[in-house]
Image (cartoon, rainbow, N blue to C red):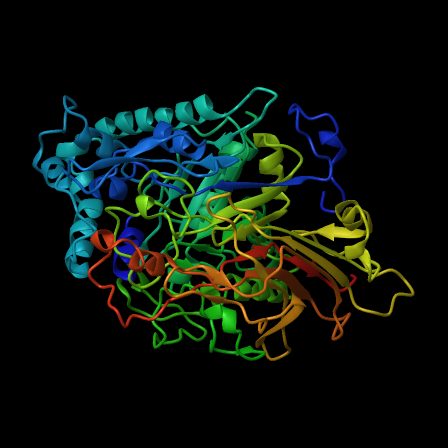
């Protein structure tokens, strides 16, 4: 997807050992030491205001059908008669449809003949499609969508004098969302596919992206989703989710996942506590945020939100892999210690707090200041697809890109969420998300484990039962290191294991290049410090890509594993660690488009165009260290 078109889409829109509670799960396939499951927690269907106007006609049932591995039919562009079937090569294990709750009712009224507002001028205007494959002027698209979001679709001609018409229509849409999730959730003991009731809370003040996906544990949800129009304060959103769901006594449980902090102009993770003045009051809000938001979406089709080079007051040198899938231009001004506006229009500034790595370090500073870390964030990834297709991340699948915007800038198609869970059920997966035993990938289904402790043996990678010994001797990803045992003078030890994506017979997965551990901390002057260490594999092994066929060349690994001890450990200093597993270079989606048969090759593919290869990767959730006391 091009940056311009991705921006259009963005405008719219117990830690130590597996719990004994799962010793007798309901699923036939039950793994006490947990297994990796892959899914999609961020996709939009025709219910979403933006997806619908872009021509999407697939609805939640279609999205789950596709995620489960069945074929659905795509249309080339709005109004086109060109259609073709598509299906995933490998079904997902779980999925959630996250349509924008804002304008649920108006979209239904404007797209359903016979409903009261269908023939209004506002609805007729809304039904004029936007073709993202055209080279449209970005500003004109922004102006149109802001008008529709800001006035047309909430006009009395659409919603009625008191808004009842839109509220009633929105209730029907919310019911459809819940019913589809219920229909496709496998309640048998086979547990082949899991769904979650979900929606997106879409906050876009001053064209900054401060969006969250709200995921419910089971079928006990809210009577109506809390949208940004209902509650423009994130703090009030968390308070209402706790009061109206978690503490309501109905069996409801929920979490929220922020995404695209890379387009938030420093606002997503800015330290802000509303009216709370005292440290005690601020600590209460920080604790609430940590409870409601245990995860962050680290990448998707609108860019990577892990890290960025040359940021204000970030020490430790450049990280070459931080250049991955950036949406903001290299010359975008730095917000430094402030915030900005306009990121979705390519304007404003970029902040270190637009990126998860530095939000994690800011959380360490807050923990020192008020005693609570609001940013103890686990990691997932997603696509944010607006075509009703969860998880179509294969770079070379041209049939999944027909009719989509040209990928001339090499943008990734998005990523996947990974969880380590005892079984493929709502309860097990949701619990994995709450304890942050999750990881994100840029698309491939590589399996990565990360444990931290104090006395793992150096030969742990060579021993049997790595996972069992990892749990027994420390904490998995998402956990806090226990207190350092008396007599131990060295720093913590971490073990990281990564297995390549096996792929399919037709499309094998890429080989692994290396594993890295990233450490972050804050110094006494308030600088953020990062250290990136290669612990397995190597960057200069000589792997390459054939420019004529995109076939991989050279050496790589099917599996990598290493035990690493922090040689610069300071027992008096908070720190955060996470792991990154990296594949060899491979062709990007634009590369694959340019070696396609001539009749399907985009016009911008020229003979002298160089390869825009990418390095797919996986990120683990972090492990935190805090000084005793």
Left or right, residue 100 beside residue 81: right
Q: Quadrant of the N terminus?
A: bottom left
- Quick check: can you spot residue 1? no
Which quadrant of the figure has residue 158? Answer: top left
Which quadrant of the figure has residue 64? Answer: top left
Residue at the (77%, 62%) spot, across then down: 493
Q: Residue furthest right?
A: 487
Q: Position of residue 455 (x, y in %)?
A: 84, 59
Residue at the (32%, 37%) spot, across then down: 45
| Marker count (numbered) | 0
Q: Position of residue 291 (x, y in %)?
A: 58, 45
Residue at the (49%, 69%) spot, across then down: 322
As drawn, 539 above or below 154: below
As drawn, 67 above or below 618: above
Left or right, residue 600 beside residue 194: left
Q: Position of residue 626 (x, y in %)?
A: 72, 62
- Quick check: can you spot residue 273? yes
Residue toward you, 84 or 447: 84
As drawn, 115 above or below 461: above
Residue at the (57%, 54%) spot, across then down: 377
Q: Residue furthest top?
A: 188
Q: Position of residue 496 (x, y in %)?
A: 69, 57
């Amino acid at each position: 997807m091009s940056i311009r078109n991705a921006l259009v889409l963005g405008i719219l829109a117990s830690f130590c050992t597996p719990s004994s509670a799962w010793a007798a799960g309901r699923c036939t396939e039950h793994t006490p030491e947990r297994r990796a499951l892959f899914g999609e927690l961020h996709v939009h269907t025709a219910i979403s205001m933006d997806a619908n106007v872009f021509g999407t006609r697939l609805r939640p049932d279609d999205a789950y059908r596709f995620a489960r591995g069945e074929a659905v039919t795509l249309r080339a562009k709005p109004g086109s008669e060109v259609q073709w079937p598509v299906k995933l090569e490998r079904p997902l294990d779980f999925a959630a449809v996250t349509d924008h709750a804002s304008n649920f009712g108006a979209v239904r009224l404007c797209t359903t003949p016979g409903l009261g507002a269908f023939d209004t001028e506002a609805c007729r205007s809304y039904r004029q499609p936007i073709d993202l494959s055209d080279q449209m002027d970005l500003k004109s698209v922004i102006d149109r969508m802001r008008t529709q979001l800001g006035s047309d679709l909430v006009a009395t001609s659409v919603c009625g004098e008191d808004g009842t018409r839109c509220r009633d229509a929105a209730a029907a849409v919310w019911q459809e969302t819940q019913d589809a999730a219920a229909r496709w959730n496998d309640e048998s003991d086979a547990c082949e596919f899991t769904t979650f009731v979900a929606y997106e809370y879409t906050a876009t003040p001053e064209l900054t992206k401060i969006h969250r996906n709200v995921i419910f544990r089971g079928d006990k949800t809210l009577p109506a989703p809390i949208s940004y129009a209902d509650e423009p304060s994130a703090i009030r959103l968390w308070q209402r989710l706790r009061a109206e769901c978690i503490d309501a006594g109905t069996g409801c449980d929920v979490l929220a996942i922020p995404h695209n902090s890379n387009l938030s102009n420093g606002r997503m993770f800015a330290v802000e506590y509303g009216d709370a003045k005292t440290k005690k009051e601020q600590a209460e809000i920080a604790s609430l945020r940590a409870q409601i938001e245990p995860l962050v979406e680290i990448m998707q089709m609108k860019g990577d939100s892990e890290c960025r080079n040359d940021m204000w007051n970030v020490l430790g040198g450049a990280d070459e892999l931080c250049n991955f899938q950036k949406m903001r231009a290299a010359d975008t001004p730095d917000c430094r210690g402030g915030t900005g506006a306009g990121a979705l229009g390519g304007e404003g500034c970029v902040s270190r707090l637009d990126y998860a790595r530095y939000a994690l370090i800011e959380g360490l500073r807050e923990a020192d200041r008020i005693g609570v870390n609001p940013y103890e964030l686990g990691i997932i990834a997603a696509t944010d697809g607006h075509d009703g297709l969860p998880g179509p991340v294969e770079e070379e699948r041209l049939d999944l890109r027909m009719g989509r915007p040209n990928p001339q800038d090499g943008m990734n198609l998005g990523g996947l969420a990974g969880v380590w869970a005892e079984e493929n059920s709502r309860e097990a997966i949701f619990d994995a998300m709450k304890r942050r035993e999750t990881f994100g990938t840029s698309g491939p289904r590589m399996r990565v484990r990360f444990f931290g402790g104090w006395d793992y043996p150096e030969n742990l990678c060579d021993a049997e039962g790595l996972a069992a010994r990892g749990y027994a001797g420390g904490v998995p990803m998402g956990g806090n290191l226990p207190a350092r045992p008396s007599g131990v003078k060295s720093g913590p030890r971490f073990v990281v294991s990564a297995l390549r994506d096996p792929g399919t017979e037709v499309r094998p997965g890429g080989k692994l290049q290396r594993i890295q551990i990233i450490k972050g901390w804050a110094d006494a002057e308030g600088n953020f410090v990062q250290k990136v260490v290669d612990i397995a594999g190597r960057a200069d092994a000589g792997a390459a890509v054939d420019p004529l066929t995109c076939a991989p060349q050279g050496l790589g690994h099917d599996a990598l594993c290493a035990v690493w001890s922090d040689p610069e450990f300071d027992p008096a200093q908070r720190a955060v660690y996470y792991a990154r597993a990296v594949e060899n270079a491979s062709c990007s989606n634009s590369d694959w488009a340019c070696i396609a048969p001539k009749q399907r090759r985009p016009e911008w593919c020229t003979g002298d165009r160089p390869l825009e290869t990418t390095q797919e990767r996986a990120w683990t959730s972090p492990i935190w260290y805090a000084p005793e006391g």
